[in-house]
Image (cartoon, helix red, strand yellow):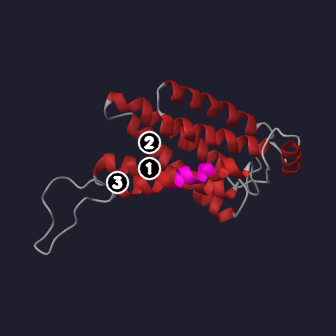
Amino acid sequence: MHGSLWVGWLLALLCAGAGAYCLARARSGPAAQRVEVRGEGLMALGMAAMALPASAVAPPAWSPWLFATAFGAAGLWALLRRHLHHAVGAWAMVYMAVAMMVPAEHMGQMGRMGRMAHSAPGGVPLLTGLLLAYYTVYVIGAGVRLVPAAGPTAEGPVADGPVVGAGPAGVLRACRVTMGIGMLAMLLAL
């Protein structure tokens, strides 16, 4: 990943932590959610690997091909399972891996040949902008759902039921928000 060394390491640690938590959650919990949670964990670990700063850890030349293949397969699998958000995330990772493969000067030449719209070193600006808009809306929406519906009153805490963001399910939702924020940071650093 290009950009600040500290941001890259923090993003890698954040995604690795979310991935480790998701994979730990996949061992227990409802059987219907295990496949989805396992996929999220693997996606987060892949994001952590892609987020490692290039200046600190020199990636092998074949790593973008590996990322593109793995995330492309994950995107197809998510689409077959009708998990549109996971498919968008996997294909966003494919897009970033392809942008890592193609040097900036070739991106501009491909745009002039008509294969890609006007492009910049960070990929195709229109596609990058659409992905940034998607993940911004996702993170804000998912973050709002983490906030409890009612807060404490002057008489004390509300006893209407469990707090939305509390417990293992709330932490899992927070991991999803974390991965969305990570995706935003990776797209901005592209």
Q: According to the image, label 3 marks what residue?
A: 145
Cβ atoms at labels 2 and 1 below 8 Å apart: yes
Ranked by sequence position, the earlier of labels 2 and 1 is: 2
Local crowd at mark 2 within 10 Å, few (<14), some, or many (≥20)? many
Instruction: From the image, state whether disc 1 or disc 3 is nearer to you.
Output: 3
- Residues drawn in magenta: 130-136
- Residue 22 is marked as 2
Q: Amino acid at mark 3?
A: Arg
Q: Nearer the viewer, residue 107 or 62?
A: 107
Which type of secondary structure does the marked residue at label 1 adopt? helix
Q: CA distance from mark 3 to mark 2?
A: 19 Å
- Which residue does the image show at 62% across and 42% down from the upper left? 92
Q: Nearer the viewer, residue 106 or 13?
A: 106
- Residue 175 is marked as 1
Local crowd at mark 3 within 10 Å, few (<14), some, or many (≥20)? some
Q: Image quadrant of residue 96?
A: top right
- Tell which residue pokes out farthest to the left in this image: 155
Q: Does residue 117 appear left or right of residue 106 in this picture?
A: left
Looking at the picture, how far across and down is residue 139, in whole percent? 47, 54
- Which residue does the image show at 52% across and 30% down from the upper left? 78
The dominant secondary structure in magenta is: helix
Q: Does residue 27 appear left or right of residue 190 in this picture?
A: left
Q: CA distance from mark 1 to mark 3?
A: 13 Å
Looking at the picture, how far across and down is residue 164, in whole percent? 27, 53
